[in-house]
Amino acid sequence: MQVAFKGHPAVKHLVESLGIPHTEVQRVLVNGQPADLAYHVQPGDQIGVYPPLPIIDNPVRSETGPDLEIEPRFILDNHLGRLAAYLRMLGFDSLYRNDYQDEELSQVAGLEERILLTRDRHLLMRSIVRYGYCVQNRDPHIQMVEILRRFNLFDQTHPFQRCLRCNALLMPVEKEAILDRLESLTRQYFNEFAICPGCQQIYWKGSHYEHMQALIEEATR
C-alpha cells in the first residue's frame, strides 16, 4: 500500500490515519530495520507495521506495543458494563462507570497504566493511552473469552474475590454480623459469607455462584 503524506509525520500519525490505533501495533520495521511509532517517515520509506500476537505465542517484547508484563488492570468504557462484571468475577481489577467521559477514560488509563477496553477505535488513538484493546464482539460472554485470549489471562484468574458492583476486594464476614440482612432461607441454608467493604453488598455461594462457576469453566476451556 502506498500512502501519501506531507512533511515528515510520525509512524503513529500515518497508522492512525488509516484507522488503526497505536495500541494495536506490536512491531514497526522501517526499511527492514526495527523502529518505533515516533519515527518520522521519509519519502520512499518502506514501513512494516505488525499487530500484537497472542502473548502465549509471542516471546518477544516490543517497545512499541504494550508491556506484556504489566499487571492486567482494566478500565472499560460506558458500553461494556457486563464485561466489567465478568472480569471482576474472574478477579481482575476493572474500573467501570456508566457516566465516564472519553477524557476521563483516557486520563485514568494513561496515569494508572490500565488497559483501556473499548469499541471506540478513536478513543484508543489518544496519545496518553499506552495500553488498550478494541473489543470485537458484542456478546459480553464472548467478550470475556476474547480478553482472556488477547492477554493470555487463563492462568491469572482468581474468581469470586471482587465485588461485581464496585470492584473492591471482598472480605469474609461472620454470619452473626449480618443476620438482620439475610432472608430466612439464606439464614437457614448458608453459613459462609463475604462482604464488600465499599458498597456493603453481601455474597454467598447460592444458585448464582453455581451459574458463575459454569460461565468461568466454559470461558477458561
Image (spheres, helix red, strand yellow):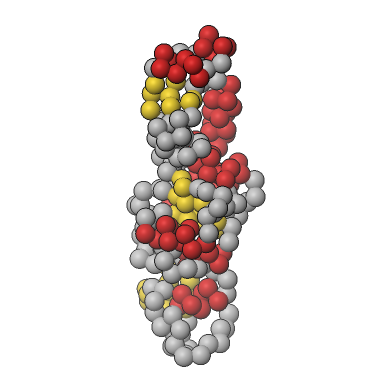
205 and 13: which one is in front? 205
Quarter where residue 113 is shown: bottom left
Quarter where residue 66 is shown: bottom left
Kindly identify the residue that appears in the image at 57 percent across and 75 percent down.
Answer: 18
Residue 4 place in picture, x, y as percent: 56, 87
- Position above or below: 216 against 175: below
Kindly identify the residue that appears in the image at 63 percent across and 51 percent down.
Answer: 137
Residue 195 in sight: yes
Kindly identify the residue that appears in the image at 48 percent across and 58 percent down.
Answer: 105
Residue 199 place in picture, x, y as percent: 46, 34
How many tags in the picture? Answer: 0
Given the current orientation, which residue lies at the most extreme top position? Answer: 188
- Position above or below: 169 against 192: below
Residue 26 place in picture, x, y as percent: 44, 64
Residue 155 in sight: no
The N terminus sits in image quarter: bottom right
Kindly identify the residue that appears in the image at 43 percent across and 24 percent down.
Answer: 194
- Position above or below: 99 against 28: above
129 and 134: which one is in front? 129
- Position above or below: 22 against 199: below
Residue 127 place in picture, x, y as percent: 43, 69
Given the current orientation, which residue lies at the most extreme right position? Answer: 138
